[in-house]
Every structure is written in structure tokens, then in C-alpha cells.
Amino acid sequence: MTGLYIHVPFCIKKCGYCDFYSLPDKTGLISEYVEAIKQEACRYHRLECDTLYIGGGTPSLLGTKYLPSLLSGLYQTFDLRKETEATIEVNPDSASFDFFKTAKMKGISRISIGVQSLINAELKAAGRIHDAKQAANAVMEARRAGFESISADLIIGLPGQDWRSLRFSLDSLTGLNIQHLSLYCLSIEQDTPFATNRPQGLPSDNVQAELYEQSVDFLEHHGFIHYEISNFAQPGFECQHNLNYWRGGEYVGLGPAAASHLKCKRYKNKADLEAYLKNPLGQITEEETLAPAEKSAEEAMLRLRLLEEGLDIDEISKRFGETNTEALTRRLVRLAAGGLLLRKGSKYRLPAEKVLVSNPILAAVLRD
Amino acid sequence: MKNIRNFCIIAHIDHGKSTLADRILELTGVTHTNDVAQILDNMELERERGITIKAKAVRIPYTAKNGDKYFLNLIDTPGHVDFNYEVSRSLKACEGAILLVDATQGVEAQTIANAYLAIDAGLEIIPAINKIDLPNAMVDECKVEIEEMLGLSSDDVLLVSGKTGFGVPELLEAVVSRIPPPKGEPENPLSCLIFDSYYDSYRGVIPHIRVFDGKIVPHMKIMMKSTGKIFEVDEVGYFLPELAVSEAISTGEVGYVSAVIRDVHDASVGDTIISPEHPETPAIPGFRRAQSMVFCGIYPINTGDYPKLTAALEKFQLNDSSLIYEKETSAALGYGYRLGFLGMLHMDITIERLKREYGQDLIATMPSVIYKVITHTGETLMIDNPSKFPNLGIIHHIEEPIIKVKIIVPKDYIGPVMELSESKRGTLINMEHPDVRRALLTYDFPLAEIISGYYDKLKSVSRGYASMDYEFVGYKPGDLVKVDILVKGNQVDALSFIATRERAITRSRALIHQLRKLIPRHNFEIPLQAVIGGKVIAREDIVATRKDVLAKCYGGDITRKRKLLEKQKEGKKKMKMVGAVEVPQEAFLVLLKLEDE
């Protein structure tokens, strides 16, 4: 399976926690940007893709004017005849009914809304430019426009958040009949507004952990499957594009800072819009081709994020060769013996109670 | 023989011994330029040229004012307090000594210590005040101190400047006129003293010798008095300062002997070389094996570097037979060595040089002294490592080594020095005022209290003005306990320590508190405990991490995710496992840090 990702590096204002490549106040460059994407796409002429994901940044800033242009460019270049899922990320402040309608008409099948919270104080603290009402409206408008697969993002660990407020957000979203939820723990990354100006009232790691566990219980109780560490879906609504990342699949990323994985090679574009607009085909950096032993370990690490599916070492060994997966197999056996992984024959997965402390386990899967 | 003079220069550190030696060598034509820096005392130089030029003695041809020709043998003495024994052996090889006092500093603790050693050895002493060219020279004060503190007549004092050469010709005349020529019988059976040695990778140990009776020539058999081992001499010679082969070294002379001695322990400093035909020849008095007073463990940071450390240590010991080592295993630190040193300065210098030789950093554990543990059955156990202490149940009492410390300090700093000394369990034995500006304090200290950091602290509380010297006086019972540190129930041997009962609790608390800061959180709770016997005297818990997860997806940037995990894994590799707990290296050095606080 092959995924196609488009990175839209524009936003109105940088949110406090955001460390994705995205520039505020550059929306004037959108038309140039769309043309540059079309140019870059030419490198992959007629490449068959199964999923499309337009992320950012704030892709909804493309608006009804540029989204059709971008999509038609992509449909012309790539072979998307077998496409099963096309997602666009939407920010509540730029989520009009018209936009949804246009998206729907042009072939978008899935909407991912950056809700983050449905408590105004939390949204404000996070530096979001919309309020709770706009966020809820966005979900409803998407539905009204005919979308049947709607996802929302929520953040755990926002300043001032507690279980009562988080439960309110979760309750409201499930009430709005979303099919998918991404639940991210707030982490303060370098060079973000929060790193330079640490907000008051951040819940501690312990509180974050509790909120996460309570959220998992809540969502499972409401019929969601905890299919990936940060992702929950009603049966059949798992994000196919992201599943492909976690299964070690191939994908092409277009736009500044977009990452690709093709023919066993990982690479990404430089995070530099200006340079990208000048020369969209000359931005590739950080190329990396892993040896089969490392590659298989990387895939195992990714697959273990899929909490239900996990990995099947026999299947991995078959693809990478026994000798290349010998050490990996040994590590998996050892971790399972220590109770850090669940094992059923050749299948391994992460125990539910280890999810919150999975980093050392995944690190131990990667190498000795 | 009557034209030979064997002498040394004794001085406190930095009183200008090396500069004066240089000037003497220059004036007598041994060296010709000012560039040849401090031949007798320059480690850099020794290292650069390999150790073969490590001249610990120089044969200086000298023509006196009256035209008589002499050979002056200038013998070097080690520069610091831990080498009292080595100093005493070098003095033994001489008939006289120049006692050098810095005119701007006056008599210091080591001046006194060395002067007493020289007086005890029966040497003729020529007191000389150095650096008189400096504007702040206090010649008269120094004379008073020499008289009062050392009991030498101020009329005999010479004034010199190593830097300008002033007074050096007079000094050389005094060496010839005041120091007696060596005695001894060339016809008697061989008797010579080893006062130093170095290791040559081709020829083995090269002892530096002073012949007292008989003579030593190539191809003769020689015997080490202390071991009875016999070697055949293949070469003898003098130091000019480079090695110069000669036909013989005769009674009264100083030189080297090469006899294919492979093991450094077969040519110990202070041993007597005799002729195997006359095994009854008495030993020159005063010989003893190097006695280690201070011990510590050293460990490679990466266990895989152990062979490299072994090689470095073996090589190192060839030139320092006073360093002893044996293999040691620590549950916490893996394979390493336990090193024994003559004293704390010897330890500091050795570890520093060893790091250089080994080429990388190493973990040196908290130094320890040898404790005497007397059991209920009356047995005495000598314990050089706190982790090796026997069970509390069998201990009747514990004795610790005591040293007598002499401190000379300007009177403005007496208060801070006394305060520092009291905090280190020092007992003031005596306080004298040899002159108006300074005091001579005599303290008894438990050696354990001053092996780490005392000297530095003494220097800092006195702004560098205090000087000290010490000697071992014996063992004394103390109210001592051994504290063990448990990390999640597992004892960390490298963190066990001995303390007075009184101080065990505060120290344990401080240590546990530091550990809590250094050990990262795990996904389980980690109790840290300090225990005496089975009794917990301090405890803190490291709470469990509840969250260590990459919750964000980062789009498709898998490489970044993988690298984050790999970085985490790398960090762990530098950790040592104590049970299931990953403990960073610096946690094992926490004891050392507590000393600094």
C-alpha cells in the first residue's frame, strides 16, 4: 500500500505547543505553493496511491479556491483510481459549510478537525484562535456537508485541564457522533512558544497519565477501539493512511518538511517554504536507507504501536529474511519473558498497562 | 673519595629547588643554556623524551676556588609529603643537604619535615635563603625562623638567588668545604643503597645506587639483600645527566646499574645490593616495603575497556613501585582494580597520570584507609574497602589510622584552619608561635578525615598560605559504623562508607538525597535506603514514572521517532544496572561530592 501526504505549511497563528513546520502570516503564498506542489508531484508521475492525507499547518486555509486546484493537480499526476481514503485536516476557525461541501465534491472522504478541547479557557491557554462553539460547529457542519467519517484531535495535559474538563470534551465529541479520535499528550518541544514561555497550571506527568487512562476507559466504554497508542476509532473507521505508517508501509510526502518512505528509503524535504517555492524538486534531505536488520526492527517498533494488531515476527522474518531478524526475534522473546510484551505464538503486542511507559520497551525492540 | 661530595637540596614545594639546581648545572658547565629547563624536576620533559632521561642524580665536575677538582653528586628528592620514606632513602645516599628556604615565604611545614629527616640522617646541613632578589624578600625573618624552628645557626645561612645566580658560587664552595667526603672501604664486600630506580623497556629496572663499600663492576653477580635474588651486572655508569657508561662505581660514588631486573619489586627503593659471595653483609638500616595508606577502586567507564586499563596500570607500575594494585569486582561497577597509595597526594597524582596513560576517563571510587576490625574472638582484620566489612555481629570494635599533622599558618588564618580541622575530627595537640607572624599547629587526625579534600580546603581557607606535613602515628579505636546503601533493596557496594556513629545519619541523608536527584525515574518506585546493620537510618523514594511515551505521530517522520528512541537507549547504555534500576555513573561518585560540600 502507498500513501500520499501533502504538507500545508500555513496557519493564522502558531499554537503554543506546535512544533510542526508551519508559518503564520504567509497565506499570500498559497497560490504559489499549490503550483509548487504540482511541480514536485511530477517526480512521482503515475504513482499508484491508496490513501491521501492533507495535513499541516492548517490545510483548511486552502479554502474553496485552492483546494480544488490542488486536488485536480494531484489527480492528474498520481494514479488515485484505487484510493480508499482521502483526509483533510481542518481548523475550526476556517471550517465553513462551503469548504466542507467543496471538499466533499472534489473527492475528500474524511475530515480531521483540530478540536483540541471544548473548554474555552483551555483553548485560550493553548493559543488556539477558535472557541469551543466553533469547534463543535465544525463537526456539525462537516456532517451536514455529508461526511460520514469525522475525526477530532484532543490534547491531554493542557493548562488547567482536569478529568472533569476533559470528560466534558470527550462527552461532547462522542455526543456529536465522531467516528475517530486522536488523543495526544501535550509535550513541550524545543523552539515552540511554550518552550520559551512555559504556561502556568500544566498538569503533571502523573496527572496526564491518569487523564489518559481515564480517557481510554471512557472511549472504550463508548464503543471506540484503542487501535493505536494515540488513536481511537469506531470499528471500521481506523485511519487507513496512518495505519500504513505504523505498518512500515510506503508513502510519498509533498511540500516543505514532508517525509517520504519509498523503495526502502526514507527522506524528507527541507523545512523551508521559500526555498521550496523556488525549487520544489531540490529540497530532499536526510536520506536514509536502513539495512534489513535495522529496517525490520524499525517496522517492529512501529507495529507495536498498533495495540490490537501488534506484529507477527514470522511474517516480518519472511519478508526480511531469517538472518536479518534473528536479533530482533531474540529481543522480542526476551521482552515477552520479562512481561514487557504480550506474546501469542509468533505474534507480539504491547500490554495495555505498559502503553504509557512504552518508550523504553520500543527502544529495546529497536536495538540491544 | 675525598674529592666526592654527595648532597641533595631539600625545600618546600615552590621554594625554588629546581631553579637552583639548574643554575648549579649551568655554572658548572653541565648544561650550557638557559633553555634547558629544570632538568631534575620536569615531568613533561621526562614524558617527551621517554623515561630514560629521568635523572634522579647528576654527577657534576667542579673545580674549587683553590683549584682542587671534585665530583659533586646532586641527588634529587621527591617533592611531596607522601614520599617521606623515599626522601629518607635519598638523604641516606648523601652526606649533606642544602636546606632551601624561600625568602618571601619563610620556613614551611615541609621545610621542617625535611630538615628533621636530614638531621636524623646525620647530614651536614647548609641553610640557604633563596629568591633574595625579590623585593618582598624577608631575609632577617627567615634567619630567625631557621634558628628557632630548625635549631640551625643563622651565621651559617647563605643568601642565594636561583634565578640570577647570586650566591651560587659561594654555595658550591660551601658544599665542598662543609659537607664531608663519603666514608667507606673500597676493599670491603659490596654494599650499596638503592635510592631510586626507573624502568627501561629494553633493559628492565635500572636502580640508582650509592655505593657505601666495595665497588660494582660489569659481569659481577649481585644480590638483593631483602629477597636474596641474584642478578648479573651488564652495565654500570653515571648520570651526566644522560647515562654514561663507566668501568666501575666505587665506594662513595653514585650511579646506575643495569642487571636485567625484570620485576620492579626486585629492586625496591631502600634495599641493599650486596655480593652473593658475602650474603652476611648487613642491610643498610631503614629499609621498608612501600606501605599503602590510602586505597581506592578504579573502574573503566565502559566495561569493555578493562583490558586497556590493565595495560595502562601495568605500564604505570613499572615506574612507581610504591603503587600497589589488585583486581577488584564491584557488583555496581563491574571489573576494576583496587589501588593502594602512600598517601593522598600520591593518590591524586597517580590517578591523574593514570588517566593520561590510559587515555580516557575512569571512575575512581571514594578513597578509604585501612581499618582494623577487632572481632569478638580477638581476631584482627585489616579492611581497606568499606564494602568488605564483616557483619556487625562479629565486630568487637573498629580502629582507624591516626596521623600527626603539622600545619604552619599565618596568624590571620588560625581561626579558619582550626575550624576546618575540628570539623574533620582533628585534636589539637600543640600550638607554637615560632615567630610573630605565624603559628605551628600540631593536630592528630583520623587519616580517613583528610584523605579527600582536606589539603585543598586548608589551602583555600588560608588563601594558599598554610602548609602541612604529616606522619603516621598508629591506630586508635573509634566509634565507627559502616553504612550500606540500598537501591530498591539491592546493596550498592561502591557506595558503602564508614563514618562515626554521630555523623552517619547526616551523611546518609545527604547522600540519599543526592542519589534521588541523580537516579532517573523508572516505571516503578525506587526506595533508596541507608542502613547500618539491618537498621534503616535514612530513606527517600524515587516515585515511578507514569508516562514515557511518544504520543504524537509526527506525520510520517518515522526517522525522528526512531532517533528519539535510539537516543534514549544510548543514554541507558551509560548506566550501570543495580538490580532492575539503571544508575548513572555519577551516582557512584556521590560520596566524593559530599566531601566537597
Image (cartoon, coloured by chain):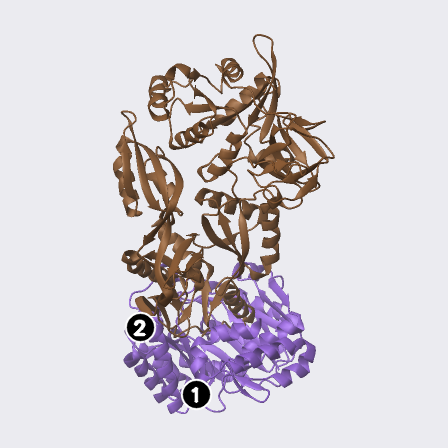
Q: Is residue B382 left or right of residue B213?
A: left
**Residue with the mark numbered 2:** A122
Q: Is residue A301 left or right of residue B413?
A: right
**Residue with the mark numbered 1:** A179
Q: Name the foreground residue: B225 vs B18.
A: B225
* Residue sitting at x 73%, y 32%: B218
Chain letter matching colour purple: A
Q: How many marks?
A: 2
Residue A180 quadrant:
bottom left
Task: Tell me: residue B342, above or below residue A33.
Answer: above
Residue B14 quadrant:
top left
Q: Give how far across and how far down residue B24 sits, in percent.
A: 55, 20
The outermost residue toward the right is B219
Q: Give how far across and how far down residue A138 sits, in percent.
A: 38, 80
Which chain letter goes with mark 2? A
Tag 1 secondary structure: loop
Which chain letter goes with mark 1? A
The tint chain B carries is brown
The outermost residue toward the left is B415
| Residue B75 in view | yes
Task: Tell me: residue B391, above or below residue B123.
Answer: below
Q: Is residue A317 left or right of residue B219?
A: left
Task: Give me the C-alpha separation between circle 1 and circle 2.
Answer: 23 Å
| Residue A99 in view | no
Which amino acid type is shown beneath numbered disc 1?
A: Gln
* Residue sitting at x 34%, y 66%: B531
